[in-house]
């Protein structure tokens, strides 16, 4: 469900707004959304680190995916 529904929603129009990710505040907002989704998927506590959640859920960081998409 993450790859089919949530990720496309978060990445919609990414090549257009990718420049906005240079701002720390905007970057943090996207990371928080991904952290919330990963916490629900892994059934983890809110104190679990992002890195641990990425490993537990088998996902890659949203910022990394964004950079890959823009390069393509």
Image (spheres, grey):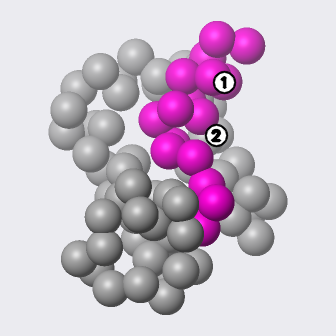
Identify the mark nearer the N-term, 2 or 1: 2
Question: Is the residue 1 above or below the residue 18 in the image?
Answer: below
Q: Position of residue 67 (x, y in %)?
A: 54, 22
Question: Is the residue 59 above or below the residue 69 in the image?
Answer: below
Which residues make up the magenta segment? Answer: 57-72
SS state under label 2: loop
User: Who's the residue at 41% across and 84% down the image?
Assistant: 44
Q: Position of residue 32 (x, y in %)?
A: 33, 58
| CA separation in Å, label 2 and label 1 | 11 Å
Q: Position of residue 70 (x, y in %)?
A: 61, 17
Residue wearing tag 1: 69
Residue, far right: 4
* Total marks placed: 2
Mark 2 in CB contact with mark 1 (< 8 angstroms): no
User: Who's the residue at 44% across and 77% down the image?
Assistant: 39
Residue 68 in the magenta stretch? The answer is yes
Magenta residues: mostly which secondary structure?
A: helix
Q: Is residue 49 left or right of residue 30?
A: left
Residue 12 badge: 2
Q: Is residue 26 left or right of residue 13?
A: left
User: Who's the residue at 63% across and 23% down the image?
Assistant: 68
**Can residue 14 be seen?**
yes
SS state under label 1: helix
Tell me the quarter of the image containing the C terminus. top right
Q: Is residue 13 left or right of residue 20?
A: right
Q: Is residue 61 left or right of residue 2?
A: left
Residue 28 badge: none
């Amino acid at each position: 469900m993450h790859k089919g529904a949530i990720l496309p929603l978060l990445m919609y129009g990414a090549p257009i707004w990718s420049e906005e990710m240079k701002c720390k505040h905007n970057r943090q907002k996207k990371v928080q959304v991904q952290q919330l989704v990963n916490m629900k998927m892994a059934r983890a506590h809110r104190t679990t680190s992002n890195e641990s959640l990425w490993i537990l859920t088998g996902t890659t960081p949203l910022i990394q995916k964004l950079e890959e998409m823009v390069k393509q």
